[in-house]
Image (tube, coloured by chain):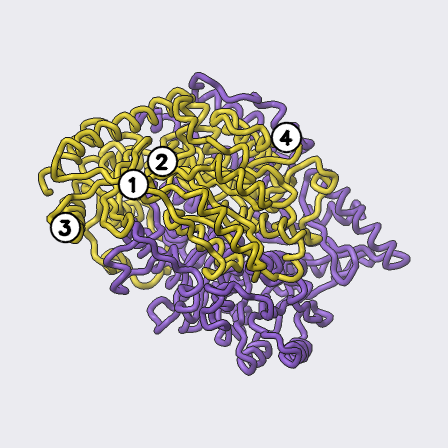
Chain colours: A purple, B yellow
Amino acid sequence: MDAQEFRTNGHALIELIADYIETIESRPVTSSVKPGDVRDQLPEHPPTEPESFDAVLADVQNIIVPGLTHWQHPNFFAYFPGNASYPSILAELLSAGLGVQGMSWVTSPACTEVETLMLDWMHELLDLPAKFRSTSDNGGGVIQGSASEATLSSILAARWRISGGNVNTTGDTTKLVAYCTSQSHSSIEKGLRIAGIGTDNIRVVPHDESFAMRADELERMIVADEKAGLTPFWVCSTHGTTSSGAVDPTPEIGEIVKRHCLWLHVDSAMHGIAALAPEHRWINDGLELADSYCTNPHKWMGVNFDCDLFWVADRNALLGALSILPEYLRSAAAQNGAAIDYRDWQIPLGRRFRALKLWFAIRTEGTAHFQSMIRRHVGLTQELAAWARADDRFEVVAPHPLNLVCLRLTGDSPEDGDVRTDALIEAANATGQALFTRTVLDGRSVLRFSIGGRTTERRHVEAAWGLLAERA
Amino acid sequence: MDAQEFRTNGHALIELIADYIETIESRPVTSSVKPGDVRDQLPEHPPTEPESFDAVLADVQNIIVPGLTHWQHPNFFAYFPGNASYPSILAELLSAGLGVQGMSWVTSPACTEVETLMLDWMHELLDLPAKFRSTSDNGGGVIQGSASEATLSSILAARWRISGGNVNTTGDTTKLVAYCTSQSHSSIEKGLRIAGIGTDNIRVVPHDESFAMRADELERMIVADEKAGLTPFWVCSTHGTTSSGAVDPTPEIGEIVKRHCLWLHVDSAMHGIAALAPEHRWINDGLELADSYCTNPHKWMGVNFDCDLFWVADRNALLGALSILPEYLRSAAAQNGAAIDYRDWQIPLGRRFRALKLWFAIRTEGTAHFQSMIRRHVGLTQELAAWARADDRFEVVAPHPLNLVCLRLTGDSPEDGDVRTDALIEAANATGQALFTRTVLDGRSVLRFSIGGRTTERRHVEAAWGLLAERA
């Protein structure tokens, strides 16, 4: 493909994408394919001769698109919103087109500098504590691919700090103990496991009836571990859990963590973005006590995946944990401290120019746009919860201050409620008219109704509720 | 930005990217910015009102592009080739436009199925051992973001296997010992460190005069560690080291590793792609003895970053190391084993539709295209080495069977040679006419001349050599 063909094909692809997004509502939310169906439609062996781009696009239309779950569909109420807004799609195209590597400042200065600026812009827009700003003494932020990677980076920084750096030589993690709740995201256990903290040393702190961590239980467990000669080192406090949107009490957790010298990570992957709207800034409560923090513009802000924002108050711990400097990566700019080398702030070496996505989105949409989207979703969520409360067959099983309602069907018994709830989720999803995720809260089946699509309006929520009410 | 604006802006951006790539040769390879220069040209605070897309594009032209290191420049001979071909740029656009999440099969079936097929296509094109194919008993492949992540995944799988899975509960890595050489990539030490294997337990196996691992020394060290009551568990054999392109003797290493029951990972991030051309398939020697293998289409194949291919012979070890299944991620398709959930094959949970990049590139370019590009680069490398050999001032300090020549200036003494070589690299790079990377081999300064640009022709290599000869 030469430059002229790229122009022609690129224009065709822009049109295809616009058409896809504009007509997405006419499709079922999920695909009806069975495992193997997509592959069966494609040649088992690579072509020896080049094919036309039109042939590829035809397969995209006829095989790929019908094999997708449509995350951009306004009736997608499953998992979390994975919005890809128009400006962020274009920014991803530009990132690919420029084809630069941002592993070090010197490997493409603009990639690093725009990223630092975007972290500071978001720091300001979310009204985060001063210590996280790149212009503070020791803090700063970086774009990670996902909250999973941010969590792991936080664990590694904490592991480095508690061991005075010794973990880099000894690799001994056997006495380290970490704390979370059963409601923490699966990436917490995964990150700890990767970092050499097995389940024997992960304490699942009990939660209260709102599914938030019990701070008193946390302190009790830390004290017990200290007495047992172990080394409590890391706590994850979640602001908006995946299953139910529960918010752990970081102001209290933070005081305990300070007293016992642990690292406090706050995971607000889904809900932290709510702080773009001033009335939702309670979601930041306690962040001034945190050592690290992450939230995902690729969830609720219309910046396409992957874009997780990760801030630390002490960049030295992060660099101590993740920096390695071979000869072929040395540069004057980094050695005199004038520049940031983001490769030392993350797990992999290579990195894309992801900051363009935030830059394009913020500049072309404006802050008010994101605020109004968040307000619309929160408003719809409250309406939905009221409809569910007014229907005797349903119960709302968790607080729903932002964009997630957890519902279940009552039944003759809790077990009967489980059966009915599971059947409802299956029946509703099978229609293809909407998509919901099932979860389990305190042992009981629950339907998560997550409202966060860029194009999701009142009529979509109303119709989805109608679907549930009809199939209940 | 609405759909109509997206169309208009998208077309403009396609033109901008085509113009950028077509005219890239008229720019210096590197930027002349100093740390802070790019940020200083941008507003310190986010805009409150939306700006026009044209204003953003103007800043791209006037601030971003002049602040880049141009990895797509035909005179870029630094680091590694980071080619972004036209079809792969378009595939990245499509991936962003479809906006799907590929963490599980059910979250977008086509994303998983095309990926598995692409790994099998590449398996066939590279002529890899049967045990890595997805249709084999237990093997299979996945796209990772980078070789760093592939390496870490390999270490975690090995750690799981050697401990019979116990590491997931105990987190005890204190007796595990890993083996590599001083020439192994920095991501090896980083991955080991993350997984709880500190430098105390990383053995740097001596290398021979070609910078390849000495297999006899490897076995000696393994035996010594076994005698000391430690547990040798993982060896990295590199097929094409970063500094000099050295190839470790995997056939011999593999036999040793088998005898002592370690996990053998082969890192061929840069050079494995050479196997697309049958005459270079020696780069695969010994792979039938490896437990895992990775190579990067985002280096030498014109597939834009990120696209690392990672294969394992035993997927159970990988799944044992990386799988965690919360309620909100359960699905029928995965539970009955009919589908692959790639989230369990990698560090993070979320994943983009990266397989499109390979699919677009292979289909629209055809295999012969990649073969001829590789052959052109290898041929130019041999010519360059001959020119350097014919010039008394230079010495070629390492074998150069593929696309990398390591040069240094001779001097009155080795130290004098170092000074001259460092000065040459600095002077040549300062012209902006080409870009080289410095490395150190056996304590001596070396200029790496890496030939792998998609648009790099004989005239570019000739001019770059002329530049070096003139400034020497």
Residue B245: % across, % down:
34, 39
Mark found first going from the N terminus, 4 or 3: 4
Q: Residue furthest bottom?
A: A259
Q: Residue at label 3?
A: B413
Q: Nearer the viewer, mark 4 or mark 1?
A: 4
Q: Are both tags, 3 and 2, on one chain?
A: yes
Neighbour tally class for label 3: few under 14, some 14-19, many 20 plus, Cα within 10 Å: few
Asked if the residues shown at circle 4 and circle 3 are in contact, with their CB atoms under 8 angstroms apart, the answer is no
Secondary structure type for disc 1: loop
Q: Residue furthest top?
A: A49
Q: Residue at label 4?
A: B136
Residue B364: % across, % down:
42, 23
Separation (CA) of disc 3 from disc 1: 35 Å
Q: Residue furthest right?
A: A412
Hey, what amino acid is under mark 3?
Ser
Q: Residue at label 2?
A: B84
Residue B291: % across, % down:
56, 40
Query: In the displayed structure, would residue A253 be above or below residue A422?
Result: below
Asked if the residues shown at circle 3 and circle 2 are in contact, with their CB atoms under 8 angstroms apart, the answer is no
